[in-house]
Image (spheres, rainbow, N blue to C red):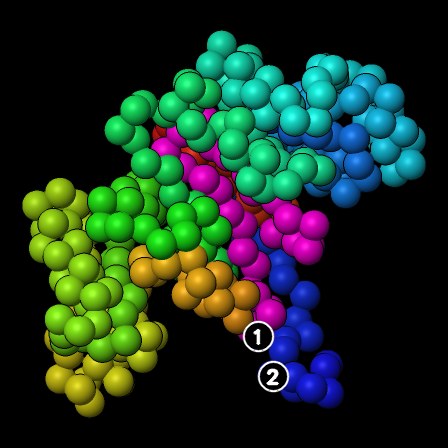
Amino acid sequence: MSDRYPFLSEIEPEVPQTLLKQAQGMPCPRVALVNAGAPQPLDGIREAAEAGLAEPILIGDPAKVAEAAEEIGYDISPFRIIDAPRAGASVVAAELARNGEADAIMKGQIHTSTFLKGLLPSKAGLRDRDARCGHVFHITAPGSDRPLLLTDAALNVDPDIAVRQACLTHAVRLSEALGNPRPKAALLAPTEDPIPSVLNTMESAAIATWARDHLQDADVAGPIAMDLILSKEAARIKGYDSPVAGDADIILTPNITTGNAVFKLMVLGMGCCAGGVVMGAKVPILLTSRSQGASARIASAALGVIVAGIT
């Protein structure tokens, strides 16, 4: 435990077994690993493959891929290896997905902005012109398989109302695919009262109104503060009546700073397992990170299988 931050958790995150079993019961996707020539991402795709969650396609410098595989003792001879320059590897992955040769795309040894630059622009052909992508984290606490879906904590920096509506829609679709027929979604704000001087409260109220017509299979509440999202007792004391209070399945954040802080506090402070996936493209996109442990990487791969099944 850190002397400086004693509230950090010492719990090792575990892959939620419900998520893993669901994914393992579905068709195994062909996963294109972009810039596979480094030990860490190659080890990540190996973990996914050994768990029955990926059929690897390795994109990058073949010599570096072979060197990395030798370093970690991984036999890559059964897999397709595609020679692509570092900057062009994402473009090749997009082409594979467009042509129906890849079912999901995973980030390898490549900067996130470079990775996404080859995948998300309209010219990449992975999304319809008006489609908006969003990242969703699937977060489970130690000892529990019930997920909290958090969006968007990794992709959209300062989303407008239309982007947040899309992110909410993605999260609701994922929650339904995970077996929740009527998810409860909370639109995070500093207060439950719409206040003109606090823009997010007004936007959240507008999104909640929109959701009543467009997401009729979900209960959506907003604006709603974090204490009401987490605690039925806080809602009772404050007189806030909503089925979402103290029982949210989804949290929609106002911006990436807020979402990223919530995600990291849950992982570092609570020992939660957080897998993540980008939705809205023709195939799921997995933004794995060098700081992620094996449980988070496997959870992300499992989400990729499930999203591939509904895309």
The quarter holding residue 267 reads bottom right
Label 1 sits on a secondary structure element that is helix
Which residue position is annotated with label 1? 269
Q: Is residue 294 above or below residue 258?
A: above
Residue at 71%, 21% (x, y): give it.
85
In the rendered image, is residue 26 in sight? no
Q: Quarter holding the N terminus?
A: bottom right
* Residue 65, magenta (yes or no): no
Label 2 sits on a secondary structure element that is loop
- Distance of mark 1 from mark 2, alpha carbons? 6 Å
Q: Which residues are magenta?
A: 267-296
Q: Which mark is residue 7?
A: 2
For the residue pair 275 and 135, the one nearer the viewer reads as 135
* Residue 283, magenta (yes or no): yes
Drawn side of residue 64 relative to residue 53, left or right: right
The mark tally for this picture is 2
Pointer 1: residues within 10 angstroms few (<14), some, or many (20+)? some
Residue at 13%, 71% (x, y): give it.
196
Q: Is residue 234 above or below residue 187?
A: below
Drawn side of residue 34 relative to residue 39, left or right: left
